Amino acid sequence: METSFGRQVKAILNIDLSKPSVSDSLNSLSSLTDSYPLQKDLKSLLKRRSLHTYKCFIEDFKPIIQQIKNLETTHNNLIENLETISTEVNRCIEKTDHAVRQGKKLQQEFQHYEKRQGILDCVMNKVTLSEQEKVILTSPEKELDESFFNALNKLQTLSETSLVLDTNDSRLLKFSLDDYISEIQEAAYEKLFRFVQQQCKILQQEKVEVLPGFYSAISHLKNRPVYYNHCRKELIKSRQYYFLRRFRKTLTSGEEAIERHISDPPLFIGECLAWIHSTLISEKHLIEGLLGNIETLTAEGENLQESTIIDKIADPSVNDLKDFVEKAINQCSLLDSFHSLRIIAFYIRNFTDTSILSFASMIIKSLYEISTLCEEKLGQRVLQSLTHIKLFSISTDLQVPRAFMERFTEFCQLLKVIDSNREFLPFYQNLYKDLITKSVEFYKEEAKSAFDTARAAVLMINILNFIKFALSEYDFAVNELQELDEDIGLDAEDLIKASIKSIIEQYNLAENFLPRNLQTFAESVLTEGKLAMPVIDSLQDMNIRNKVKSIVASSILETYRGLLEKVNENDRPSAILEQLVNL
């Protein structure tokens, strides 16, 4: 809205200065300003005009101020509206997030329900058995053929499906399915159980012809532990009866009965264990064909080892085996006892290493007991050998006693067995100590009491050389050979001392005079080159014999040299003695 001041200003600005009248008016203004009164009036006029102008300006500005206030009010309202909008937007964001979460949850639930719907559809397609399948599974008259096992597999699938349905959402469906299949399952498994029992009776016969369905039947019975364990016990019982009956027949009946070799213990024990080994291998193959594998049974009592089905099948034959083997061992010689021990150790290792029998088997336990019995018999045979040796006196020819040679020959046969089977080396030390060492000690005492030192030394050297020669071909007897060499050296020293003493006494050697038979002695030394000593000649070892004679002769000659140096020149011996001294 245009004010009066504005109109005036506009009018002034619109004045046309080119007009003469306007120009004249402007020129006349200078004359007006020259006079004082006029100037004063003009200032007053201008002041009034200025005040009027200000007043008009203020009047004109009032609407603007009001508009500014209105604008400020509008601005404040706008801010309040924006804050309200922001709050609403945040609330919408929260609602949107909640809606997204709800949407994801609904999506997951939808997928879950789709999966459950698929399971339900699958169950609905499989839960039904045809009437023919029900009859095949439950009727006792129907045989266990391929159709039976196909229907049983379908029933097993239903049972597995029931386990899948064991959730909160489908538990009612599971209960309904269990009610549907439980009665059919019981009838089918009972039919399987009766079939397996009938087949177990067949397993007692000499020739086993098990129906092809046996393995499938007993495999399905594993789902029912009570039925399965009972069938397994029936199977073990049947095979136990067959194995024991056949073992006794093999031992005692027929022209080739093993019992006829009982007088030869190693052969008898070897044939018994060989028959058990081969028969148990056949049993293992049969059981694997029936059950699919050789299962372990629960450990009993303090036995930490689990026994197997094969262990249980063989266990009833333990008593018969022990009776016959112990009877054979009682007739063993020293060598037979050791051979029997070797055979038993071989079969223990063979049974266990090839997993035919476990260490929990009664057969293995009894073999360990028999092995201990063999060791005891071995010790008894050693004592009997020592008793046999002590019954015979030593001979006067100073050679190795015959009784010792007989027993030592048997001992040498054992050494050959040990040399080819080094696992028996621990027995060698005990045998050597018990038989050889004690025999040598016995002969040493006997020789000392029966002979003089020289003859006793010769006897012991012959015995020790006899033992040394026999042991020299075995590298495991190195320590014993060294000890024998030391003992032979000690006995040789005793022999040398005794021989020198004997020669001195024989030829009346003394430090104060020359023997009368000096010439005779010198001649014998020169002509024969050796001393005639029967004791030394009885030695078997030529090296020891020559060594002893050489030392004895040199010792005697040294004695003569000393005596000759004390003799006066008038008593100078003959040329023969001079030759003797120069030897």
Image (cartoon, helix red, strand yellow):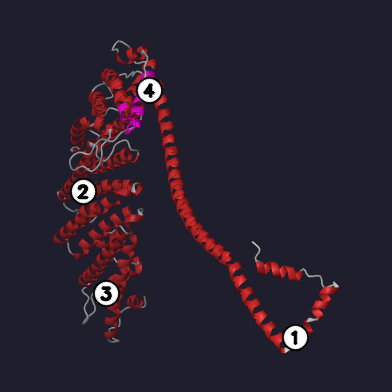
* Earlier-in-chain disc, 2 versus 3: 2
Work out how far the residue at label 1 is from the one at label 4, CA to CA, in angstroms.
134 Å
Quarter of the image for residue 320 reads top left
Residue at x-position 81% and y-position 70%: 16
Of marks 2 and 3, the one in the foreground:
2
Residue 440 image position (x, y, % from top left): 21, 57
Q: Which mark is residue 33?
A: 1
Q: Disc 2 vs disc 3: Cβ atoms closer than 8 Å?
A: no
Mark 4, secondary structure of its residue? helix
Q: Which mark is residue 124?
A: none
Q: Give the extent of the magenta segment.
A: 150-172
Q: Which residue corresponds to mark 2?
A: 403
Q: Which residue corresponds to mark 3?
A: 518
Q: Which of 87/255 is in front?
A: 87
Work out how far the residue at label 3 is from the one at label 4, CA to CA, in angstroms.
118 Å
* Earlier-in-chain disc, 1 versus 2: 1
